[in-house]
Each structure stands twice: as C-alpha cells, then as structure tokens.
Amino acid sequence: DLIWDRLPAHRGGPVTRWLARNRHRVRAHLLPGYAPELNPVELIWGHAKINPLANFAPTEVEELLHQTQAALLTIAADQPLLRAFIAHCPLSLRLP
C-alpha cells in the first residue's frame, strides 16, 4: 500500500511511471495535495523532530543524514507507533 499525497513534486514522470509499472502489486491511497493533516508521514516527521532529533545540532551534512536515517529506522521498527500515526489521520485505510 502507498499513501500518496499527490503534491505536485510527487506527480512527476518517474513516480507516475513507477506506479503504472507496479500497479499489480502496489495499491495507491490518494490524498489531496497540501493536506498534511491527512498524511501520516507528517506525524512521523513531527515525532522524529521532537523525540530522537530534538536539540540535535549537527555540524556536518553527513552527521545530519546519519542521525535522521537512524531516527527514521527506529520509528519504522515500531509497528504499533506507525499504526497509531495512521489511525490518528482521518483515512479510510484498513491495515491487516
């Protein structure tokens, strides 16, 4: 399943071609562009900013990338947290 906000930057040729090629195995749940309250990924970013990355002041881009990846991997490993983000958004998405 793919929750897709259809922001103009995400509707480019590479994305739409990939979705067309993978239509048989990926189901897209379409959200309106510019509707962050409907998009669970905004809750993930918010959680990362106020929890693992709070007060983090990197001096190098590589340090920022490493810490951000580590924070997102930690969040991704927490299935109950991810499901809570989805449940918090007013979506009609049913998860197994």
Image (spheres, rainbow, N blue to C red):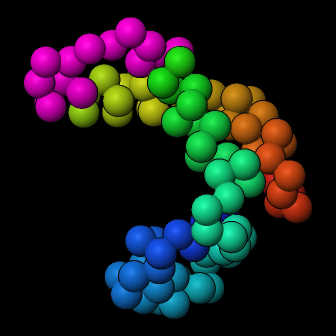
Residue name at image x 74 percent, y 54 percent: 38
In the depicted structure, whether residue 34 falls above or below residue 30 = above
Relative image position of residue 76 (x, y in whole percent): 54, 35
The question of residue 54 being in magenta is answered with: yes
16 sits to left or right of 92: left
Residue name at image x 74 percent, y 30 percent: 80
9 sits to left or right of 38: left
The question of residue 9 being in magenta is answered with: no
82 sits to left or right of 21: right
Relative image position of residue 30 (x, y in whole percent): 69, 73
Q: Quadrant of residue 61?
A: top left
Residue name at image x 51 percent, y 82 percent: 19
**Residue furthest front in the image:** 34
| Residue 92 in sight in this render | yes
Relative image position of residue 7 (x, y in whole percent): 53, 69
In the depicted structure, whether residue 85 falls above or below residue 15 = above
**Residue furthest top in the image:** 55
| Residue 4 in sight in this render | no
Residue name at image x 43 percent, y 25 percent: 71
Give the camera-side residue of 57 and 86: 57
64 sits to left or right of 69: left
- Give the overall secondary structure of the magenta segment: loop
Q: How many marks?
A: 0
Q: Quadrant of residue 1?
A: bottom right
In the depicted structure, whether residue 19 falls above or below residue 71 = below
Q: Give the magenta range.
A: 51-64
Q: Quadrant of residue 34?
A: bottom right
